[in-house]
Amino acid sequence: MKRRSWWLHGPWLAALILFAGCAQWPAGWTTLLDGERGLANFERSGDANWRAEGGAIVADRGSGMGGYLLTRESYADFELRAEFFAEAATNSGVFLRLSDPANITPMHGYEVNIYDDRPGPEYGTGAIVGFARVPLPNPHRAGGRWNVLEIRAEGTLITVRLNGVQTVQLRDGRFAAGPVALQFGNGFDGRPGGPIRWRRLEIRRL
């Protein structure tokens, strides 16, 4: 009887343990991009040729400084997770807390950079342009593979991780809230930048 009782209750116990384990995962994540889905969650700025292609959202052309995808909502304290593919010549990044969405620059928000071959490599991939430098030579390179970018912005503290490794941490209160923007940019010399592919983007308010 004891063995039969365990057999009857075992699945319930296993389900309870599984539920308890899942309950430890943070709730409240919103998926903004999932494969080729999600462009409607963003507004466009500039003329980059954002499109759904090959299981991702892709851009590889644009005049001038390129273009951006801006979230329709503003975010103050949040966590962000993104999967992206870049080349060494790709000029991309994620802008946070943009104070003026009409002026998407490092003077109007925090730019977490994706740009392995950036002139001025101290603000290359993994850096926050103008605020937090990466060491040189930069060990955080993204070109030629899929990567996971994680950003946590809480109060004045911003932490950036690339493929599970912290690249920089910044304490600064200049920008408090604003949209998030994904970038496609051309090279500093005016030549087209490499393509950027975003396969997944999730965000959670803190």
Image (cartoon, grey):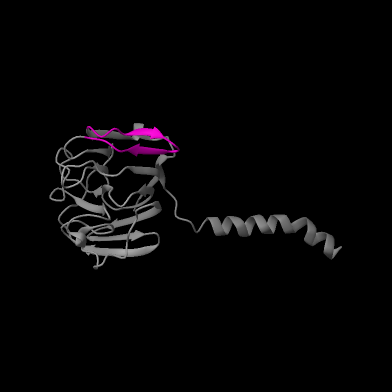
Nearest the viewer among 45 and 135 is 135
The residue furthest right is 1
160 relative position to 56: left or right: left
Residue 51: image quadrant is top left
On the image, the x and y values in percent for residue 141 come to: 32, 59
Q: Is residue 69 magenta?
A: no
* x then y, percent, for residue 39: 35, 33
Q: Is residue 49 magenta?
A: yes
Q: Eyeballing the image, is 134 above or below 96?
A: below
Q: Tag count in the figure?
A: 0
Can you tell which quarter of the image residue 99 is in? top left
Q: Is residue 122 above or below residue 38?
A: below
**Quadrant, the N terminus:** bottom right
Residue drawn at 21 percent across, 54 percent down: 118
The residue positioned 67% from the left and 58% from the top of the image is: 14
Left or right? Give the position of 27 relative to 3.
left
Instruction: Say if 107 sits above or below 52 in the image.
Output: below
Magenta span of residues = 47-62
Q: Residue at x 72, y 55 (%)?
A: 11
Relative image position of residue 16 (x, y in whole percent): 63, 57
Q: Give coordinates of residue 93: x percent, y percent.
A: 27, 49
